[in-house]
Amino acid sequence: MATGEIDEAALAVKFAVMRPFLDERGWRVYLGTEANMLGHGGIAAVARASGAAENTVAAGASQARAPQELAALPPGRSRRAGAGRPKAGKKQPRLEQELDGLLEEGRRGDPMSAVTWNILSLRDIARLMTLRGFPVGKDTVAGLMRAAGYSLQGMSRVKEGTRHEDRDLQFGNINAEIARAIEEGEPVISADGKKKEPLGEYYRDGRSWQPAGSPVKVLSHDFKDKDTVTACPYGIYDIAANRGFASVGTSHDTAAFAVNAIRRWWQAEGCLSYPHAARLLITCDAGGSNDWRHWLWKDELAVLAEETGLRIEVMHFPPGTSKWNKIEHRMFCHVTRTWRARPLMTADDAVAGIAATVTSQGLKCTAVRDDTVYPTGAEVSGERRKYLQNRVIERACFHGEWNYALLPAPRPAPPEPENEPGFTRPGRVPGRVLNHPALTGIPAEDLNTLASELEVRFEARLAQRNYLHRGGDRVNAFRTTAVHGGRRLGIIEHLLILQLRDYLHLPTTAVATLLGVDRATVSHAATIARELLAAARTTIPAAPPPQNPPRTPAGLLAYAAAAGIPLTIPENRYPMPEVFRTRQRRHTSDTPKGIK
């Protein structure tokens, strides 16, 4: 057939139909078969109609004339072994070694740690390899790196930081309590504060369907202006009912705001869903506005328990495990999806976005707006903390700092036996008994007045000593003092010890027996009392000591009975000596050493 008679348009249609059904070898042989049938000029005509190279068509024509060559190819191969251009690694034998050295230079991080990374891109690596005399492209570099075990990866947020030794035990404890409460029909909620969101034309991650060429336009930066209002969502997730609730505030994320969100959830939904509830179980994180160390959180919950009549049980997740809180992956993640790719212009937009959050698993959400101003820096007084600790908070045996309950009605106040006449604390003589002029040489009212004047200096000295001992400030502002025989020795006890030693010349062991403390504590307390008096530049105007002070325990009891003092000698691990040795007076500051 002459070349001019070839209908290349018909060939093009035929080739377009057949191309999807043939592999490389079949396509090549098919084109060669058509070229052989066309005769002279067929190779060029087939190449123009199919878009293939003339060399490919010629190779196919040759293989079609010699089908035994096709049969010699292994199954699945389109070409003979060794066909095509050699790989860069074979043309340049030292390419892989040079690439390893270059990657080592671009590695960052501690070589001994498990986390290292490379700061060079594929194009940077290809350029540097070319400068070193090994010309390669970025695709070749990518292939070599994959063969060496490299892959393109992002960062994985799976490390938890410090891992508490009782983490798993606390998880099991929380799961068991949740199952028990749900089985009994009691409300169980997961509470937490969501990430704060600036209100205005600020960028948000994600994509949404928009008309082509008309994206939502927002500010080019995320820096807040001085007038920018921040939305603070606090969420409550009802685990049994699969219901979400959020209170969106515009003030501060404080404990008062968090508890008020729980209060509004109970008033709007909780009391209706659980009309016969007697207790409320709250699972929450260990930090933030619901921090287990904050007394304001406990104080606000105590008020809520009193208002609702519910026994509020709180279980905190261990530090660093907030991602296990159910509200994170059952509610907040879906709220983030609802808010994606749209700016939150006002707090009402944030409320509407939360209220519109639903899932195929049945999650429904309710949201309210809280415009109350919650000031920061609020503290709970020491008296209130003592009241909560003694009468309202009930701590569990296992990690009572994480697991505790707030009672709706406070426990009865513990009796104060020291104020009752005739009471003697086991192992200690009451201070009101020892504070008698016959034992101290000074009227009780004067000694109490002196103690009040030295109270500030005494507490300041104690605070400084504790600060140096700890090496920093207290984590909890509520001080738990060291105790001796039931309570810490105050300034009045320090003055009593000093006067019992100086006025009656009682030995250290005798005073320790009366106060129920260690002998070293008596010596230390007397030294502190002297230093405080010297710093205040004052002295104790005591009466002259008795001419015949008591020298035995029996004599001390007779001496006290003669003065009308109801003194008894308590039992102590340091028994009072049978005979008191006469104590020599210490040298005063103005007496030269060696002169008696």
Image (tube, rainbow, N blue to C red):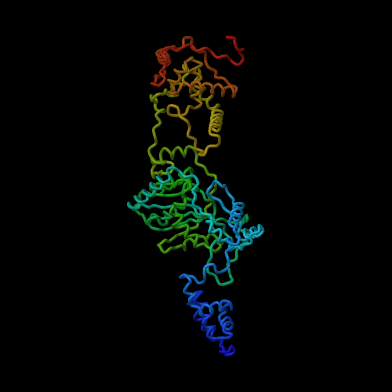
Q: Position of residue 188 (x, y in %)?
A: 39, 52
User: Split into 4 quadrants, where in the image is the N terminus?
Assistant: bottom right
Which sits in the foreground, 327 or 505? 327
* Left or right: 525, with 132 as reference point: left
Q: Residue at x 43, y 52 (%)?
A: 190
Query: Looking at the rendering, in which quadrant would you find the C terminus?
Result: top right
Q: Farthest residue toward the left? A: 184
**Front position in the image: 187 or 556:** 187
Query: Can the viewer see residue 299?
Result: no
* Residue drawn at the location 40% of the way across and 46% of the way down: 313
Residue 377 in percent (x, y) is at 54, 44
* Residue 477 placement (x, y as % from top left): 51, 38
Q: Could you say which is closer to the camera, residue 388 or residue 73?
A: 73
Q: Is residue 35 above or below residue 100?
A: below
Camera sees residue 40 = yes
Going by the image, does 421 lie left or right of 134?
left
Q: How many marks?
A: 0
172 lies left or right of 85? left
Q: Tell me where residue 397 sits by quadrant.
A: top left
Where residue 8 sits in the image (x, y, percent)?
56, 86
Q: Quadrant of residue 86?
A: bottom right
